Amino acid sequence: MYLVEHDGRNEIVYAAGTASDRWICWEGRVFRADFHAPLSNPWRASRASVAQSLTAPMPARVIKLMTHPGATVKKGDPLLVLEAMKMELPVRAIADGAVIAVHCREGDLVQADAPLVDLQ
């Protein structure tokens, strides 16, 4: 856990993983970075033009599911909550859209990179 100053505010940032496979949780969003990769922009998330699959950032348990197929979501809406290493990690919509599929249920154990929700 780190205390970071951003835009004049102090914010808490969580980090987990190894130096070559680091997971960062900030403002309800999860980023994955390889600190041995070139520094062009390690935080940029890839976005598909048609559909986006949100995946588990690390091995975790699904503790709360807040969406369903066909639901309309806005950017930042919480879709589900994961629990890993005694932390709750909300998974939020990365853009306005519709939920195409939900690939998990409450109580499921999911591995890193497991698909959780598909958005369009």
Image: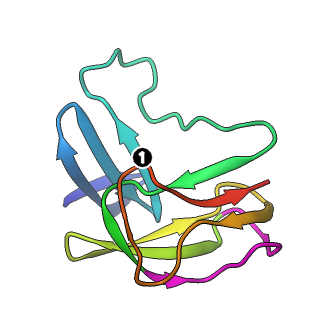
Which corner quadrant of the image does residue 116 belong to? bottom right
Does residue 106 lie above or below 50 as drawn? below
Does residue 96 lie above or below 109 as drawn? above
**Amino acid residing under circle 1:** Phe
Q: Which residues are magenta?
A: 63-75
**Residue 103 location in percent, x, y?**
59, 66
Name the residue that disc number 1 marks.
31
Horizontal side of 55 relative to 50 (left or right) equals left
Horizontal side of 86 relative to 68 (left or right) equals left
Horizontal side of 89 relative to 16 (left or right) equals right
Residue at horizontal 71%, vertical 64%?
101
Residue at horizontal 67%, vertical 79%?
67
Tally of numbered discs: 1
Residue at horizontal 42%, vertical 46%?
31
Query: Could you tell me what secondary structure mostly forms the magenta stretch?
Result: loop
**Residue 91 location in percent, x, y?**
51, 66
Residue at horizontal 44%, vertical 17%?
40
Which corner quadrant of the image does residue 89 belong to? bottom left
**Residue 26 location in percent, x, y?**
40, 58
Element type at mark 1: strand
Tell me if mark 1 has few (under 14), some (14-19) or many (20+) residues whose alpha carbon lies within 10 angstroms of its own: some
